[in-house]
Image: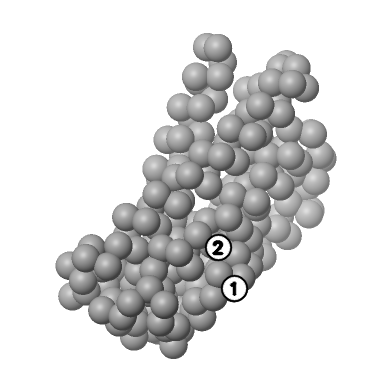
Amino acid sequence: MEQFLIVAATHFLALLSPGPDFFLVTRSAMSAGWRVATGACLGIALANSAFILAAFAGLSALQPHCTLFIVIQLAGCAYLLYIGSLFIRHAGSSSLHADDNRQPPTLQATWRQGLGMGLLSGLLNPKNALFYVSLASMVSQASLGWKLFYGLWMFSVVLAWDVLVAMAIGNLRIRRQFSRYLPWLERVAGAVLIALALAVIIHLLWR
């Protein structure tokens, strides 16, 4: 039980740290409503599950110095640069006064497209693979049953947290209150994602 509490607390604290997945959920919820954003939430949770499974299975491809892991990181950086530039370029182009059924002109807001964007964001998030490899080392001596339980728990927590964020930010009244700040929030989010990508690239070049 003590190990579970440590793992659960570590995992949840990592969720509280804003990253590419968080910005995707908030951007989707703000521009299209929380129902559409749940697609991105599920995609992110599924991507996290893939990393959890790979890390807990001890796949060598997820070791930090392996070529495939570096390629994944670079692909993730390219994705962050793309999403970051997209946020900045389209800052303020979405109306927060539209109802949840309206299709926004950017980051097309169908549930399936949200699912695909969430899956891609989670798989190409440079932080995810490294975090779950580190977390797996904490439970390396646990039984298969406990590892399955940890995996299901983390999938559920990721999904529940992202849906809660989407519901809070996707609320029409909250969206209206934030309408004047949305362009700046989008620009800041874009800048953070670009900075994160550049930091990872610099780290890979100088290590």
Element marked by disc 2: helix
Residue at 61% from the left image edge and 70% from the top image edge:
112
Residue at 55% from the left image edge and 70% from the top image edge:
111
Q: Amino acid at mark 1?
A: Gln
Rendered-image quadrant of the N terminus: top right
Residue at 21% from the left image edge and 71% from the top image edge:
176
Quadrant position of residue 181: bottom left
- What residue is disc 2 on? 39
Structural distance between the alpha carbons of marks 1 and 2: 8 Å
| Disc on the earlier residue, 1 or 2 | 2
Quadrant position of residue 139: top right
All told, the count of numbered labels is 2
Element marked by disc 1: helix
- What residue is disc 1 on? 113
Task: Please say whether residue 207 is visible from this viewpoint.
Answer: no
Scheme of image coloration: one colour
Quadrant position of residue 124: bottom right
Instruction: Provide residue 36's location: percent of width, then percent of height.
Output: 48, 68
Cβ–Cβ under 8 Å for marks 1 and 2: yes
Instruction: Provide residue 101's location: percent of width, then percent of height.
Output: 41, 77
Image position of 104 with respect to 79: above or below: below
Residue at 31% from the left image edge and 80% from the top image edge:
98
Residue 129 as seen in the image, left or right of residue 104: right
Task: Please say whether residue 52 is visible from this viewpoint.
Answer: yes
Instruction: Provide residue 48's location: percent of width, then percent of height.
Output: 62, 47
Q: Amino acid at mark 2?
A: Gly
Instruction: Provide residue 153's location: percent of width, then percent of height.
Output: 58, 32
How many residues crowd mark 2 within 10 Å: few (<14), some (14–19), many (20+)? many
Q: 7 or 66: nearer the eye? A: 7
Residue 102 as seen in the image, left or right of residue 42: left
How many residues crowd mark 1 within 10 Å: few (<14), some (14–19), many (20+)? some
Disc ID at residue 89: none
